[in-house]
Image (cartoon, rainbow, N blue to C red):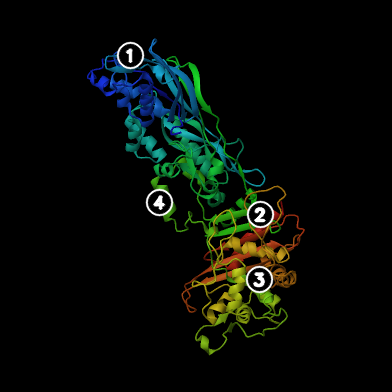
Amino acid sequence: MKKQRKWWIPGTAVLCVAVGVGISLFLRYRGKSPEELLISYMDCISAGKYEKMYEMIDAKASGNISLEDFTRRNQAIYEGIEMQDMKISEIDCSEKEKTVKYTASFDTAAGKVSFENEASFTRGKEGCLLVWEDSLIFPELGAKDRVSVAAIPAKRGEILDRNGTVLAGKGLVSSVGIVPGKLKDRESAISEISGLLEMDPEQIEEMLAADWVTEDSFVHLKTLPKVQELELGTLEPEEDVVREKDRQQRLLEIPGVMISDKEARTYPLGEAAAHLVGYVQSVTAEDLEEHEGEGYHTDSVIGKTGIEALYEKELKGRDGCRICVVDDQGNEKTVLAQTPKEDGTDIRLTIDAGLQKSCYEQFQQDPGCSVAMDPMTGEVLALVSTPSYDSNDFILGLTDEQWTALNEDAGKPLYNRFREAWCPGSSIKPIIAAVGLKTGTLDPTEDFGNVGLSWQKDASWGDFYVTTLHAYEPVTMKNALIYSDNIYFAKAALKIGAENLENSLDELGFGQEIPFEILMTPSCYSNTGKIESEVQLADSGYGQGELLMNPLHLASLYTAFLNDGNVLRPRLQYEDKAEGEIWLEGAFSPEHVDQVLEGMDGVVNDPNGTGYGAHRTDTRLAGKTGTAELKESQEDTSGTEIGWFAVFTEEVEAERPLLLVSMVEDVKQMGGSGYVVAKDKVILDEYLGR
């Protein structure tokens, strides 16, 4: 259907005398029987050849209808109902009564229409012509009747979190408009309205000048947030709520301005879930062309980003349609066709709205992202990218200034960071340790020896040295994880070897699409697909070099430490009684997992551990911090740092199992990964303490 609003096809205009037809019409159809004439006439309807149809009628016997009125009436109805595939059958001609009985059937926007009908004809010396009446279109259609084509809008499905909390659904907004006839001091009023609505006065004048506008029309100007009445006794109402309430009150004080409630798609979590949930917008001409035949019309909305776009087909539903004949008093005479609406399907996600919001609130000013999972099922509990934007703004309508500000914001709020791949730094070390154990190239008890805070294999490395922050003894795998020793893991990578490491990372999903509903950037260990040098290999051991990881991929690999070495597939669609689905079976052995887990436990629970800031006495946690340096050379002091913290509930039987991975760009002046640890601690306190 092409229209969602109800509309009327007008009745026949004042009749005028047909001229210019003459005997040429008879000559054109000379020799045709009434049956053949009827078939030719009906064939022209499907082709939209209204002028040829007119040549087949006896205009005088048809009330002297003009070609213009004939075309207007037929075209408006047939094209308005989207008539297609006209078929005529069971034709029975009576020469005595000069009638042709037939059965017509065709498809419409509301489904198939089929009816029995009767057409009259005249016969002259040169042949026969049809007598046109409105009933030739539909038997029940009179000259003053109209055909109503009304959409029955389908409800768009809601997007829900695991507990049924609405992430996207039907809500109320405020529609601000003008009743032109009630404006006083028009120029001054429009100037004030334009200032309050941040619109150009010329734009408002243009909207008021539309052909359909009368003095009593309500002319919609802008959609604003719905502001509920502030509760009595509220000491500190949100500043933006107070500001919006004041703006709408000032608008209502202008004579001629009206504000009414209007249903619209709303996003209760706003900025906290924008990159995940996305937003809808009105369809464009390009959308209608791309999705032709899929039930979209000019008043439709379509998912543009996030879950709204990913599950567009399921959420959209399909509008119903009702085609009726209505008399000139507006009374319904008969229903010609009707198709029921099919409401869209609700999409329930594994997301925990409270955790999603908590992650956003902690990092909302930081360029970064967070991924939270249930490590026992693979269910994704939160996907957050910061800074963010408010999906509701796209429903209300962004001004050019707002759109420009979003695009020029240095924090890149439109950029979805959880979909990208980043330098993981030391957060990759547990994976490297497990790879070394699996390939038999590392002995977890071997003491690599204390070589200080700087090391290189030999002089062939030139000016390149691997540096670390802490000296400790013995230099074993467990301690290397606790102290996050770059030198140990550089040596470990060299022991593993480039080929072993490449093959192992390939087996762990590097260079592959992550099996997840949302498309993520694949992780990689080299720009060329190969580790080209010893220095690159050593760098890769502690998450530098050309190694890049998607945060969801990193979180998925960490599930191996709680599932006997099996990596679980991350999932976003909620299922009752969900069980973990293995993505990478036997990635590591249970024995190797336990050996690595000893060090990860120490990261959070040993006072020397780099993640000790997240230590809890009520819940045993394990994890790994990471600080990735981004600089042009080893001597570069102006480079930035990416901070990571990956942490999870260590006990398999934990009451609220959680695996949380957070990343923040540019933490060099904020305490490195310690900044992320402190933020994650608040999230853990809120979630585990519920």
Q: Quick one: label 1 or label 4, which is nearer the N terminus?
A: 1
Which residue position is annotated with label 2?
A: 379
Task: Give x and y (percent) for residue 626.
Answer: 60, 69
| Contact, mark 1 vs mark 2 (Cβ under 8 Å) | no
Q: Contact (CB < 8 A) between labels 4 and 3? A: no
Task: Estimate the spatial distance between the alpha carbons at disc 4 and disc 3, rounded to whole Å.
Answer: 43 Å
Q: Nearer the viewer, residue 78 or 555?
A: 78
Q: How many marks?
A: 4
Q: CA distance from mark 2 to mark 3?
A: 22 Å
- Between disc 3 and disc 1, whose residue precedes? 1
Q: Which residue lies under the disc numbered 1?
A: 122
Residue 77 location in percent, x, y? 40, 25
Give the amino acid at mark 1. Thr
Residue 215 can be seen in this image: no
Viewer-nearest of discs 3 and 1: 1
Marks 1/4: CA–CA distance: 69 Å
Amino acid type shown at disc 2: Glu
* Label 2, label 4: how far apart the Cα atoms are: 36 Å
Q: Secondary structure at mark 2?
A: loop
Q: Mark 3 belongs to which amino acid?
A: Pro
Q: Which residue is mark 3?
A: 430
The residue where tag 4 is placed is 404
For discs 2 and 3, the disc positioned in front in the rendered view:
2
Going by the picture, which residue comes out furthest to the top?
96
Q: Residue 549 location, x and y as percent?
A: 56, 66
N-terminal-most mark, 2 or 4: 2
Q: Residues within 10 Å of mark 3 (few under 14, many from 20)?
A: many
